Amino acid sequence: MAQFLPKYTIFTLFLLSFLLQTQSNQFSENLTTKSTGFKREKLTHLHFYFHDIAAGDHPTVVNVAKPPTTNTSDALFGPIYVVDDPLTIGPNLTSKIVGRAQGMYALSSLSEFRLVMSLSYVFTEGKYNGSTLSILGGNSISAPVREMPVVGGSGLFRFARGYAVTKTHFFNATNEEAVVEYDVYVLHY
Ligand SMILES: *[C@@H]1O[C@H](CO)[C@@H](O)[C@H](O)[C@H]1NC(C)=O
Ligand SMILES: *[C@@H]1O[C@H](CO)[C@@H](O)[C@H](O)[C@H]1NC(C)=O
Ligand SMILES: *[C@@H]1O[C@H](CO)[C@@H](O)[C@H](O)[C@H]1NC(C)=O
Ligand SMILES: *[C@@H]1O[C@H](CO)[C@@H](O)[C@H](O)[C@H]1NC(C)=O
Ligand SMILES: *[C@@H]1O[C@H](CO)[C@@H](O)[C@H](O)[C@H]1NC(C)=O
């Protein structure tokens, strides 16, 4: 009898692992927001300053591609930039850093000076440390006020959606630093 026990045990384990595998191979399942901890949707307002520094010893934006036709385009159409821009609590670069905007933007209009930005805003301060917001949209940088959609987020900003209203606050010609004020309104759980 004892010699059949290991065989039986192995068979049970095989059956069990087969059942578990069947379950984990399920492509989709219906969940309730309660069971996953997403209970009540909140509206959060964030206020910070974005610093895009093009020159000097520590640039935070680099031009990675530029077509030869940009020079002859009135709207400077075509170049692509990659950025890792600090976000600060106050307008001065020396004020506390609350995160960084990482990603890219391109001059994407043939007729006006307009960027399309695709950036991940990675927060590093307080309870939002490690949480991110994804902002994707057009930015007519010569307009006094611009609006861009928040299309998602991670961490405390899971399921995020909302919008960012931005204004150029200051331009420092020494290091070609554009200081942009952000008001972000975001719905999340
Ligand atoms: C999820 O819910 C829908 C609608 O109630 C139902 O048709 C579907 O079979 C469910 N899917 C699963 C995987 O339970
Ligand atoms: C475009 O202009 C820049 C700055 O004036 C110059 O350095 C560059 O060589 C020009 N490029 C072309 C393709 O003409
Ligand atoms: C930022 O702070 C520095 C040093 O404290 C100061 O020289 C500079 O004028 C400030 N910039 C602005 C835009 O207030
Ligand atoms: C944010 O999180 C990182 C990684 O967990 C940690 O090293 C850092 O000290 C945290 N910063 C703050 C301000 O809490
Ligand atoms: C402009 O940038 C330079 C170089 O980083 C810095 O020394 C100076 O304080 C800045 N000016 C203002 C008004 O912020």
Image: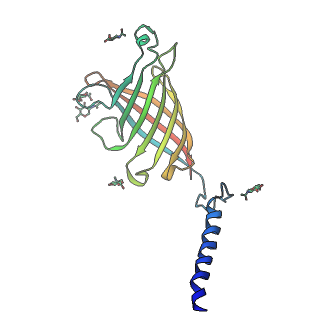
123 up-or-down from 66: above or below: below
Count the numbered circles shown.
0
Give x and y (percent) for residue 111. Answer: 52, 12
User: Quarter-wise, where is residue 79 in the image?
Assistant: top left
Q: Residue furthest top?
A: 72
Foreground residue, 110 or 18? 18
Q: Which of 21 and 189 is in front in this view?
A: 21
Q: Residue furthest bottom?
A: 1
In front here: 88 or 105?
A: 105
Q: In this view, does 60 lie above or below 157?
A: above
Colour treatment of the image: rainbow
Looking at the image, which residue is at 50% across and 49% down?
Answer: 154
- Please report the residue visible at 45 percent of the width from the left and 18 percent of the height from the top: 78
Q: In which quarter of the image is residue 175?
A: top left
| Residue 33 horizontal/vertical position (percent) | 64, 58
Ligand number 4: quarter of image: bottom left
Quarter in which the N terminus is drawn: bottom right
- Taking the image as shown, residue 12 lies to the left or right of residue 50, namely right
Question: Where residue 74 sits in the image (x, y, percent)?
Answer: 45, 9
Residue 73 in the image: above or below residue 19: above
Residue at image location 50% in from the left, 20% down from the top: 108
179 and 107: which is toward the camera: 107
Q: Which residue lies furthest to the left in this view?
A: 57
Residue 117 in percent (x, y) is at 48, 30
